Image: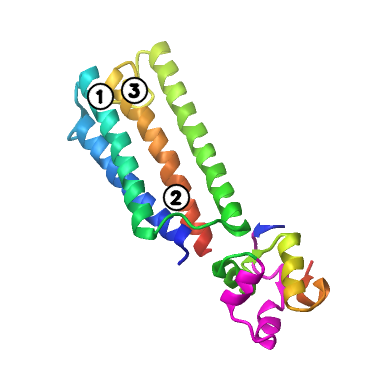
Amino acid sequence: MSQHEKFAWGSLLASLLVWLFLTMRMTEGWVFVDASPRDMIWTYGAVVVLMIVAYAVLAGVLGGEAEKDERDLAIAARAERMEGVVVLVAVNVLIIQALAQAAFAGQVVPGIDLGALPVLFYALLTVLFLGHLTSQAVTIWLYRA
Amino acid sequence: MTGPTRQGRVSNRVRALREAAGLTQAELAERVNASRQTIIAIEAEKYAPSLELAFRLAHCLDATFEEVFSYAD
């Protein structure tokens, strides 16, 4: 297993754990909590710090990031393209949800009220995590394919 | 096509020529400025190298491009 693949595994697991932390902060069971803007600023800061710490630990454990050769760069480029596609689709789903919610009485996805700041905050951060998780998963898959 | 590719389209004799030259995968990788994993992927025909890397491999293995790589339609 190359160092880049190990890094992708570590990044995937760390991102998943940080996203679970975000989910636990923003939900209670299957319902969104009515978090205040100050709480969300704290949560946002904690998510950023946790990701930075996770990457620092990963870099320390793996002894820094190794130089990428052409196959590593080709794999990284494909993974980033897939991440872009996933983020594009997810953002469009949010746009459609927001517009449908405003235009019609019902909601496209029940229980997801993008008019509420905590839900919007969680949805946008989840889109970022989804993109990153996709990128790492595609990286692992391409190294193993 | 450069990059991860369908197995069998671009075939090569890298492993045979490398072994004939008495090189390990790590030694060949160092000489062509690639990782050992990339050499493994090329030998397994899971990755088709760029033209530049292909020519470097041929040069290191003291062979012509055509002796190392072939393409099946």
Pick whichever, A65 or A109, lies toward us. Answer: A65
- Of labels 3 and 1, the one closer to you: 1
**Is residue B59 found left or right of A5 in the rendered image?**
right
Disc 3: which residue:
A120
Quadrant showing the N terminus of chain A: bottom left
Mark 2 and mark 3 lie on one chain; the one further toward the N terminus is 3
Relative to B25, is B32 above or below?
Answer: above
Q: Which residue is mark 1?
A: A40
Q: Is residue A71 above or below residue A79?
A: below
At label 3, which amino acid type do we have? Answer: Leu
The single residue placed furthest to the left in the displayed view is A28
Judging by the rendered image, the residue that carries numbered circle 2 is A136
Marks 2 and 3, Cα distance to the nearest angstrom? Answer: 24 Å
Contact (Cβ within 8 Å) of mark 3 with mark 1? no
Identity, as a three-letter code, of the amino acid under mark 2: Gln
- Which is nearer the N-term, disc 3 or disc 1? 1
Query: Is B43 rendered above or below residue A84?
Result: below
Confirm whether circles 3 and 1 share one chain: yes
Q: Residue at x 57, y 42 (%)?
A: A81
Residue A31 is inside the magenta segment: no
Q: CA distance from mark 2 to mark 1?
A: 26 Å
Residue A30 in view, yes or no: no
Mark 3 neighbour class, 10 Å CA radius: few under 14, some 14 to 19, many 20 or more:
some
Q: Magenta segment range?
A: B4-32
Q: Nearer the viewer, residue A101 or B19?
A: B19
